[in-house]
Amino acid sequence: MWGDPDTAIGGNRDRFPSTQVSLIASAAGEPLAMERVVALYWKPIYKFIRFKFHKDNEAAKDLTQGFFASALERDFFQRFDPSKAGFRTYLRLAVERFAATQHEAENRQKRGGGVEFAELEDHSASTASPEEIFLQEWRRQLFVLAIEDLRAACAAAGKHTEWLVFEAYDLAEGERPSYAELARRHGVAETSVTNYLAWARGRLRGFVTGRLRGVTSGERELREEMRRLWT
Amino acid sequence: MDLNVELSDSVLQHLREVADLPDLTGTRYQLQEEIGRGGLGVVYAARDTQLDRRVAIKVMDAAWAGEARLIARLEHPGIVPVYESGTLPDGRVFYAMKLVAGAHADGYLAGNPPLGERLRVVQRVGEALAYAHNCGVLHRDLKPRNVMVGPFGEVYVMDWGVEGVAGTPAFRAPETSLDQRSDVYALGALLVFMLPADAPPALGAIAAKAMRRQPEERYPDVAAVLREIGRFQDGLAVEAHAESPWQRVRRLAKRNEVLLWLLAAYAGVKFLLFFARSF
């Protein structure tokens, strides 16, 4: 988007530095829930900040990390009221306020020091709004995490072929192999390929729901988020 | 197995599509294609392999199974009949229903039907609503896209909502706690939508009363709206509309049109006979 690559933080196995997890976990008092929030929202927030405030990779990372640290210090997560807004919206608005304040302070400092703020170029390459990017990254991260869960479940249950079929077909970039080709490759019947895919997709959906359940305030919000995810 | 997932937009879109598809393995249905999404779930076309016919399969979250079962029990000519229900391997529930052919109300209006036909559609919708209310079920999301007019003129009210369904802004009553009068509001909005630009003011007045901001100022129930529309069709005064003397004369004249024509013909004949005798 801006010529420098996105951060790997929030991506997969090394989603966030372990020090950050422990900082957040100990401060929030609910390690699992907090870890889930960070796992799911780190990357969408980072992308949102990059796009909305035209920050480079490192600046966006610092702001994202700063947001989580500030949120914990100020009991931000405890102040969430589900009757007023969904958690995702609450989080995005808070990020926007936080980043805008930081951005303005930075600009003031630069102006005071006689340094012109140079806006990064090429930020208009995408036609999506920062809010749409936030939503899309949220969807993407949900699926990334659910795929990790699926992979772990397959490994634990010895369902290696099921995973390989799913990986080869549903995670394929470009042209997908045919069911017949997959059946030959793994020495199974073609009907088994469709059954494996149906099983893996069903489990994937379950893991997506589970991930969402960990970051929503109740059944109603969960249902609304599920609708937002699939439509 | 090692994984380093970087999902492109195209793979993400594919996953969103396939992970949402219902797994109908073990049922008599073969999935065909998605035909709609509503407040309660997603509707697919499927083939019933035992009876060799197309059906609609509605898939919804398991959390709504209780209220959805209540909706499935509704039996009325204006409500799509449910053939069978079941649970998918992932816990979602599904209903196999009649696959209704026809046009949604907005598409139906594109054919510019006469006023009487438009009112007939609103009345059929109202009858289905009144029946459902008697069974303790609200629609919660009545709008033109949820009204289907079939090739034989049959009218179906579809996509019955459950607690928590947000509704559609233009047709949704302003109150947050919904009851029968919230559906009365939506029926009024539907009436407005169905009326032509030159509709008689009495019909606009009925819709306006049904859509009053305060629920207690609306018609108390759907039956009262239907009675008002019936009075309009019978040429009687509509309670929601204060007529001017001229409007009253016009309505009475229209209501007694045949009698007036007979009287005019009688007067004309008498007049001709009078002149015939004079000469």
Image: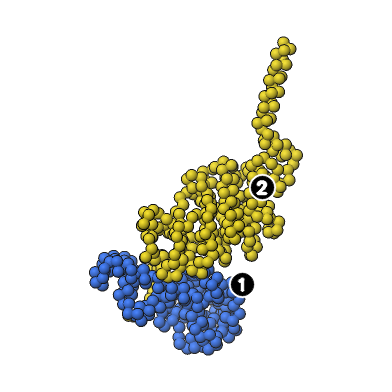
Residue on which the image places disc 1: A84
Q: Colour of chain B?
A: yellow
- Tell me if B241 is positioned left or right of B169 in this view: right
In front of the other: A61 or B31:
B31
- Tell me if A186 is positioned left or right of A25 in this view: left
Relative to B176, residue B108 above or below: above
The image quadrant that residue A188 belongs to is bottom left
Which chain is displayed in blue in the rendered image? A
Relative to A149, residue B224 above or below: above
The kind of residue on which mark 2 rests is Glu
Q: Residue B228 bears which disc, if any? A: 2
Q: Where is residue B141? Give x, y as percent.
A: 57, 59
In front of the other: A25 or B149:
B149
Please report the residue visible at 59 percent of the width from the left and 77 percent of the height from the top. A80
Please report the residue visible at 67 percent of the width from the left and 35 percent of the height from the top. B254
Quadrant for the C terminus of chain B in the image: top right
